[in-house]
Image (cartoon, rainbow, N blue to C red):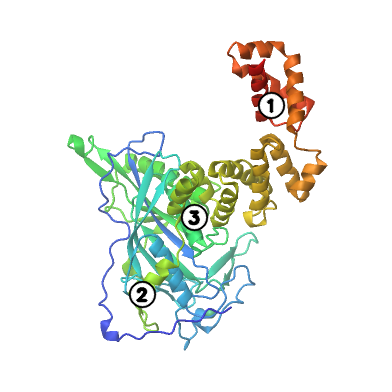
Amino acid sequence: MLIPHRPEPSPPLAILPTFVCPPERLSESVPDTASAPVTTTATTVPYTTVIGLEVHVQLQTQTKLFCGCSTKFGAPPNTQVCPTCLGLPGSLPVMNRKAFELAVRSALALDCRIASFTKWDRKNYFYPDLPKGYQISQFDLPFSSDGTLEVVDPKGAWSRKVGIIRVHLEEDAGKSMHDEASGVADTRIDLNRAGTPLCEIVTQPDLRSPQEARAWLNELKLLLVYLGVSDCNMQEGSLRVDANVNLHIPVDGGPDAGGRIAKTPIVEIKNMNSFRSVERALAYEAIRQYEEWQATKAEMGKTPKQTRGWDDPAGVTRAQRHKEESSDYRYFPEPDLVPVTVSDEWLAAARQAMGPPPAVLRQTLATTWKISSYDADVLVNQGGDLVAYFEELAGKVGEGKVASNWMQQDVLRTLNERGGTIGEFPVRPAALADLIGRVAKGDFDTSRAREIFAEVLASGRPIDDVVASMGIAAVDDDELVALCRALLAENPKVVADVKGGKEQAAAGLIGQAKKKNPNVNPGKVRAMCLDLIRQM
Ligand SMILES: [Zn+2]
């Protein structure tokens, strides 16, 4: 399906704002928190690590941002291109309305202010995979700014609210593929990716440890996947992270003792291919910067910013180049695209179309189904389909806690072992609810139910079939009474102990009962034996 391109509004050019320089992305006037305790690290270090992130997210549109070419991943190189994304003379871009909608949805979920008027700018630089010689991006008037996203430790040990400076929309570049293995300096260019819509999310330098950064990225990814704006697949490059990091080091005891805070030069780290790499790279870089500061006492502002690449196998960052300042890009307003205006009505509709974000969903699950916030966190972190499965199951079982236990101990464990998605899971909520219901009725106990569950999974047969073939039958009351009487006759010491007030002695009878008849329900055996002893 081709997504229709936006019928363009045409505001008079006179309302184009004057061109102004943007603020520095990584604020140099960071609130002074060097003396605050680092809550997420076990060891205390003599500095505060200050981290800001820049996240690029490919939006899940079927076509590119300014042309009708497909964005499908994995096609043969240079088969998804046209004069517009190749930057050929005479071609004109037209904005993809769907991309804008998805971008606004992301920004709304990040609590950003949405600009009623936004425009496009050319970011000029030369690179082989950028055929136009410039990237269409947003400079001084991004479509959204001033947001926040909080990450909360599921065990409640810490939380961190991270400010979002801005979210803007831009086009992706192509890919250069360097064939170093062949021994010749052979580089090929694939322009299929050129023009794919990207959301760039820039945070305030609010994160205080590599662990926090990783946890926050997980929360961001979860949010974007829930919103349906991106698949956030890092292997396919749908989500890419750059990190800005420096240290705040108390000097002469810090401000409280009449000293001051020294700030190390900000380093931007690139080439991190997983959230784990982000965490490792930041941890490495913090130590490296501290050692460098001890040796050189170099502070921010006195040396230029640096970009370092993360070498994952070696576990080190390596200097790449000094970071460009935004003035190097010679931004100017894109003359081929009209600015975009956003009405209040449109925004209200976009807001309404959004499902609850993960943070809200966790609370809803915990209160609706009376499960712990930790359990709610585990469920929500698995994605919307698993939450839907759980809610259907809990609704049918009528007991949130019981349903949640089955989800965590059985469904999730099986999914982890076998792989696959909850949508393909062979035991559907109705069947699992039936199984759990039979345990509640006393047809069999939980460990028997687990055996049945495993057999249903292995064979794909319905529960009734499996129950019949395993020779599991409900033990009727007369049979149970007879069995318990026999047990008590064989165990006079247990009877005496229980009569003497040690009710827990009855537990010793369960194993024997199961040997006599593996289908008995342990709870029922225990209750029946206690009843019979009381009558003796
Ligand atoms: Zn194209």
Q: Mark 1 belongs to which amino acid?
A: Val
Task: Give residue 351's position: percent from left, percent from top.
Answer: 40, 67
| Residue 226 to residue 47: above or below | below
> Between 498 and 449, which is closer to the camera in this rendering?
498
Q: Earlier in the sequence, mark 2 or mark 3?
A: 3
Mark 1–mark 2 Cα distance, whole angstroms, equals 65 Å
Give the label on residue 222, or none.
3
* Quadrant in the picture for the N terminus: bottom right
Rendered image: mark on residue 345: 2
Of badges 3 and 1, the one in the foreground is 1
Q: Is residue 507 above or below residue 401?
A: above
Q: Residue furthest left?
A: 258
Task: State which quadrant residue 54 falls in.
Answer: bottom left
Q: Amino acid at mark 3?
A: Leu
Q: Earlier in the sequence, mark 1 or mark 2?
A: 2
Check the image and name the residue furthest to the bottom.
90
Residue 510 visible? yes
Q: CA distance from mark 2 to mark 3?
A: 28 Å
Residue 372 image point, x, y percent: 48, 41
* 60 lies above or below 497: below
- Residue that badge 1 annotates: 525
Q: Please rate how many residues cluster around mark 2, counting C-alpha atoms within 10 Å: few if below 14, some from 14 to 19, many from 20.
A: few
Whole-Å distance between the Cαs marked 3 and 1? 46 Å
